[in-house]
């Protein structure tokens, strides 16, 4: 059925009215591939910690497109030549940058598909849409892949100060109620400029950049790496891993046809063809939630227990330390769990595990945020800032976690 461009604006709780800039973009938004993002949560299992965090990838991508429109407007006003074709390609690129996310955003790419990132799948979707829409997405794909000659356009879509980050920090802050992440995206965009084909920030915007970097660090510790949400994400990955193991042993699990396909097949990057993409396009959060409800009464203890933990928010205990957890401590805890629930060591590993979490607010090595001084010199923000903490925030902070069932030892 032919789409008709009758919807001109969308009301967004963060920015107000978002204008859809063209009929092509309207048709992309209306496409079933994109509409699926209404059923993909932006923040995974974080709603178990922050009850308001039920916003979706659909919200986020529209917000990022809105900010891209503002960025194009600002750069054009400063004499940066961006033609209409390039502008449309930027809107399309940022609109579709997250289209490859699976259920609960990151669960699929770490559990039941192998060596395929959501960026890879986003590109597969973009290429499929390009074929369907008579190659009208070719320039957007070129910019997205950083193959276009004007490199600053790619930076607007993917860099340390791109429209993606400017939207998700502010949006996630709004929906979680964690005000530390409320960056001033309008001010940052107003300070953008291009120098020698590189995206830079005018010197008078340096304090806004500093706040942005600090906000990112705080949001990671307070929200994205919050220990309760973190353990819930790990339980989700382990639940899907167990389901895939059982399916591989010939056990048929109740779930949607799309999820069943990925449980029963080993999908690698080489095998991710058009047929697989179509099946992936049918997957969303509801597939996982409904499967969880079926599996909560399954005879396999590991699968049913993990499902019930997530459904009822009865999660594992998690301890976060500066130093790695000793092998002896992990082994002892596994033995306690094995004895209490009559599990094998392999089964106990689903409930007792350790690892590390990393937070690096700013990367001084790859794709830096550059400040344009009043004298026309370009300097890394960490060097230009009079705040010593920016360089300190570029250091990778690693913490170690230890998860195990409550009520099993101390």
Image (spheres, rainbow, N blue to C red):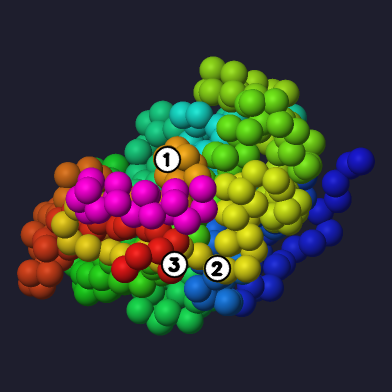
* Screen quadrant of the C terminus: bottom left
Left or right, 142 with respect to 267, comes to left
Separation of marks 2 and 3 at Cα, in angstroms: 9 Å
Image location of residue 189, percent across then percent down: 38, 65
Q: CA distance from mark 1 to mark 2?
A: 22 Å
Residue of label 2: 314
The number of numbered badges drawn on the structure is 3
Q: Which comes before the other along the chain, label 1 or label 2? A: 2
Based on the displayed image, in which of its 4 quarters is residue 108 positioned? top right
- Residue 218 has which mark? none
Taking 221 as reference, is 271 left or right?
right
- Magenta residue span: 325-342
Give SS at disc 2: loop
Spatial separation of the CA atoms under disc 1 and disc 3: 18 Å
Q: What residue is shown at x 37% (from left), y 37% (from top)?
A: 150
Q: Which label sits on residue 406? A: 3
Residue visible at 30% across and 47% down in the picture: 331
Of the pair 377 and 130, the residue shown nearer to us: 130
Residue annotated with mark 1: 345
Point out the tag, 1 or 3, that comes first from the N-terminus: 1
Q: Earlier in the sequence, mark 2 or mark 3?
A: 2
Would you say residue 101 is visible in this rendering? no
Is residue 304 placed above or below 172 in the rendered structure? above
* Circle 3 Cα neighbour tier, 10 Å, few/some/many (<14 / 14–19 / ≥20): few
The quadrant of the picture occupied by the N terminus is top right
Q: Residue 270 magenta-drawn?
A: no
Q: Are marks 2 and 3 in contact (CB under 8 Å)?
A: no
């Amino acid at each position: 059925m032919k789409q008709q461009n009758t919807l001109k604006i969308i009301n967004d709780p963060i920015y107000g009215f978002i204008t859809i800039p063209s009929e092509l973009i309207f048709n992309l938004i209306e496409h079933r591939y994109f509409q699926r993002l209404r059923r993909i949560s932006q923040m995974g299992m974080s709603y178990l910690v922050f009850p308001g965090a039920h916003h979706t990838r659909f919200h986020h991508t529209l917000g990022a497109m809105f900010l891209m429109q503002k960025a194009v407007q600002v750069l054009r006003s400063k004499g940066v030549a961006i033609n209409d074709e390039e502008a449309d390609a930027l809107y399309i690129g940022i609109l579709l940058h997250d289209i490859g996310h699976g259920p609960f955003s990151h669960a699929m790419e770490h559990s039941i598909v192998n060596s395929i990132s959501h960026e890879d799948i986003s590109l597969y979707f973009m290429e499929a849409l390009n074929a369907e829409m008579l190659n009208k997405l070719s320039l957007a794909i070129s910019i997205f892949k950083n193959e276009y000659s004007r490199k600053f356009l790619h930076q607007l879509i993917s860099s340390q100060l791109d429209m993606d980050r400017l939207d998700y920090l502010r949006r996630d802050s709004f929906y979680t109620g964690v005000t530390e992440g409320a960056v001033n995206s309008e001010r940052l965009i107003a300070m953008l400029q291009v120098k020698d084909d590189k995206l830079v920030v005018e010197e008078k915007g340096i304090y806004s950049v500093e706040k942005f970097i600090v906000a990112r660090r705080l949001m990671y510790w307070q929200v994205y790496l919050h220990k309760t949400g973190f353990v819930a994400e790990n339980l989700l990955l382990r639940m899907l891993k167990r389901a895939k193991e059982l399916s591989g042993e010939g056990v048929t699990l109740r779930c949607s046809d799309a999820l069943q396909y990925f449980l029963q097949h080993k999908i690698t990057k080489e095998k991710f063809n058009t047929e697989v993409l179509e099946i992936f396009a049918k997957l969303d959060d509801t597939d996982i939630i409904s499967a969880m409800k079926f599996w909560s009464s399954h005879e396999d203890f590991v699968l049913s227990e993990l499902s019930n933990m997530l459904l009822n928010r009865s999660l594992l205990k998690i301890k976060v330390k500066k130093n790695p957890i000793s092998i002896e401590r992990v082994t002892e805890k596994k033995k306690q769990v094995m004895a209490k629930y009559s599990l094998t060591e392999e089964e106990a590993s689903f409930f007792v595990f350790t690892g590390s979490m990393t937070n690096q607010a700013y990367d001084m090595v790859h794709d830096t945020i550059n400040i344009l001084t009043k004298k026309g010199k370009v300097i890394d923000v960490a060097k230009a800032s009079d705040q010593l903490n920016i360089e300190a925030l570029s250091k990778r902070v690693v913490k170690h976690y230890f998860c195990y069932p409550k009520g099993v030892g101390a």
